[in-house]
Image (cartoon, coloured by chain):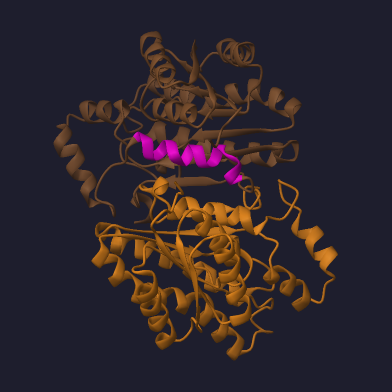
Chain colours: A brown, B orange
Amino acid sequence: MRLANKVALITGGTSGIGRATALLFAQEGARVAIAGRNEARGQEAVEEIERAGGTATFIRSDVRLAEECRRAVEETLRAFGRLDILFNNAGVFYPHTVPDSTEEEWDLTLDINLKGTYLMSRFALPTMIAQGSGVIVNNASGWGLVGGNEAAAYCASKGGVVLLTKAMAVDHSRQGIRVNCICPGDVDTPMLLEDARIRGMAWEAYLASAANRPMGRIGRPEEIAKAVLFLASDDASFMTGAALVVDGGGTAD
Amino acid sequence: MGALTGKRALITGGASGIGRATALLFAREGAAVSIVDLDAGGGQAVVQAIQGDGGRAIYVRCDVSQPADCERAVRQTVGELGGLDVLFNNAGIVRRASVLETSVEEWERVMAVNVRSVFLMSKYAIPVMIEAGGGAIINTASGWGLVGGRQAAAYCASKGAVVQLTRALALDHGAQGIRVNCICPGDTDTPMLRDEAHQLGQANERFLAEAAQRPLGRIGAPEEIAQAVLYLASDAASFVTGTVLVVDGGGLAG
């Protein structure tokens, strides 16, 4: 087991990539704190981990709020006694151009995707520094590296996540902390379904548009989770400040 | 069950450094490994180490800049191991000099070993992979394939080419089930790194101390780079293609 005796905190852990990562981390021996806004889905994920013989707890929290981020870290420490891995994964997406988007959407996107990553890291880092070790993995996006259509706020937020990743890597590597991000392409998650709905596209047509990319398909949450596991594990001991693109070749084009 | 159980892997430059560490790791993870290298003594030593641990390996002597050698290396690997699932294009050399100090012959040798070899080995390996329904290719590029480095003009040019060849291969062969990615290591504790110190006329200690000036405060171990190659070679990376994986202790982050 690659994460034996480790404790992981995963934001947005109740669905999609976060949930798949929580299940995989637990399989690999980690005790997992699942942070999210949806209590019912969170408890479901916890129960699924426990049924498989793993250990998990749900912490209701909104990453936009400093106090809730502080409490998520504190509750993780209270439950499991340490914090080795922080996966900043919570994110939202609104498919709009700048003129089409509202200021509320902009603020929501930036607050959850970027400020949430800052806040959780801010409260997790002191514990990791005191332990002398820790790993942070941030969920950025292929659209944090190249522009995407009708996704202005999202692109801005994810570009911010990529560079916040590098800045934290520079600041905290000497304290034994590695910081990396993943850049997924389109993945079969509720967020993608919602994107198709808002764009007014049938799911089949949406999936067909993915056939143009080199691998001819979208990704599965489990495939992204394996990239997060690699970065979180000691196998990636010389990796920090890196952006790992997992997109079926989408941005190679 | 290993991450590469039942797989057959060909590793160029497998006799030393990152190639050797990757060969040993791949074998531990269940792969049969073909060590392709000019250095027969080093190559045979890796084969013996793998066999001593109960693994399966062969050595193929090969100048990766030569088409006939590359074709034979692929043919012999497929013949003796029964197929080819993973190609690790890792052979490389470095010339630490500016353009003015690099002779035409040196330029051509660096390009031949670092880039032409990736083209040639891929050219002969891909048909085998297409026939089998898929495969994984990993190329050793470099942090200096992404940013410039001083007194390393031919090396930088060659590694930049490897990065782009990786992406082009990924686009052309993704639909055939072949994933193509590259790693970009930072300074790693290998014979090549010591060769750089020698070429620059610097003492090893001073050169290594300067190389450690990166966020993690140290150079990498070949085994740490090998783990990144293993990830890309394994089914864990099933949605990863055309990707440039930087493994450099944060060297390029700042």
What segment carries the magenta color? Answer: A221-236
- Name the residue nearer the viewer: B112 or A114: B112
Q: Residue A43, located in which quarter of the rendered image?
A: top left
Determine the main secondary structure of the stretch shown in magenta.
helix
- In the rendered view, would you say B202 is above or below A220? below
Q: In the rendered view, would you say A106 is above or below B171?
A: above
* Image quadrant where one finds the C terminus of chain A: bottom left
Residue A193, horizontal then vertical, whole percent = 25, 28
Drawn side of residue A209 relative to residue B158, left or right: left
Residue A70's place in the image compared with A180, above or below, is above
Q: Residue at x 43, y 54 (%)?
A: B4
Residue A239 appears in the rendering: yes
Looking at the picture, how far across and down is residue B138, in whole percent? 45, 62
Q: Residue at x 41, y 43 (%)?
A: A142
Q: Position of residue B154 (x, y in %)?
A: 59, 77
In the picture, residue A36 is in which quadrant?
Answer: top left
Image spot of residue B42 (x, y percent) = 63, 76
Asked whether the viewer can see residue B93, the reply is: no
User: So how many labels did they put on this image?
Assistant: 0
Q: Nearer the viewer, residue B31 or A205?
A: B31
Magenta-span inclusion, residue B123? no
Rendered residue at 58%/22% (across/down): A120
> As drawn, is A20 to the left or to the right of B249?
left
Occupied quadrant, residue B24:
bottom right
Reply yes or no: does residue A234 show up in magenta. Answer: yes
State left or right for residue A95 relative to residue B183: left
- Please state which of residues B28 and B116 is positioned toward the viewer in this rendering: B28
